[in-house]
């Protein structure tokens, strides 16, 4: 009976956690875009790294981080993000 209750509650908790994580990622993307538009590459880099800490396989954040690193002249790290 306890297992059945846990199984019934777990999907809701997982769904809330997943939604919360996606909202946090979205917020980081918004801040990164504003930072890029205002020329604040270090802040954009920080935001993209925060996204990758939450979702290491986020290809958009990895590509944009690679772009920021490339523009900074950090070609080795940029290439690693583009791969």
Image (spheres, rainbow, N blue to C red):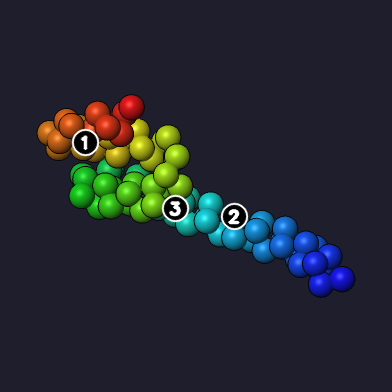
| Residue at the spot of label 1 | 77
| Residue at the spot of label 2 | 18
Q: Position of residue 77 (x, y in %)?
A: 21, 36
Along the viewing direction, whichever of 33 and 12 lies nearer the viewer: 12
Along the viewing direction, whichever of 57 and 7 lies nearer the viewer: 7
User: Where is the N terminus found, in terms of image quarters?
Assistant: bottom right
- Which of disc 3 and disc 1 is earlier in sequence? 3
The residue sitting at 30% across, 34% down in the picture is 81
Give the Cα distance between marks 2 and 3.
11 Å
Disc 1, SS: helix
Along the viewing direction, whichever of 58 and 34 lies nearer the viewer: 58
- Which of disc 2 and disc 1 is earlier in sequence? 2
User: Is 13 displayed left or right of 64 in the figure?
Assistant: right
Disc 3, SS: helix
Disc 2, SS: helix
| Residue at the spot of label 3 | 54
As drawn, the residue found furthest toward the bottom would be 2
């Amino acid at each position: 009976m306890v297992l059945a209750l846990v199984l019934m509650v777990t999907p809701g908790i997982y769904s809330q956690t997943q939604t919360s994580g996606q909202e946090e990622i979205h917020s980081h993307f918004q801040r990164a875009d504003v930072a890029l538009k205002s020329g604040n590459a270090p802040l954009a880099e920080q935001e993209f790294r925060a996204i990758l800490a939450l979702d290491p396989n986020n290809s958009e954040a990895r590509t944009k981080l690679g772009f920021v690193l490339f523009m900074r002249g950090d070609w080795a790290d940029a290439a690693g993000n583009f791969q």
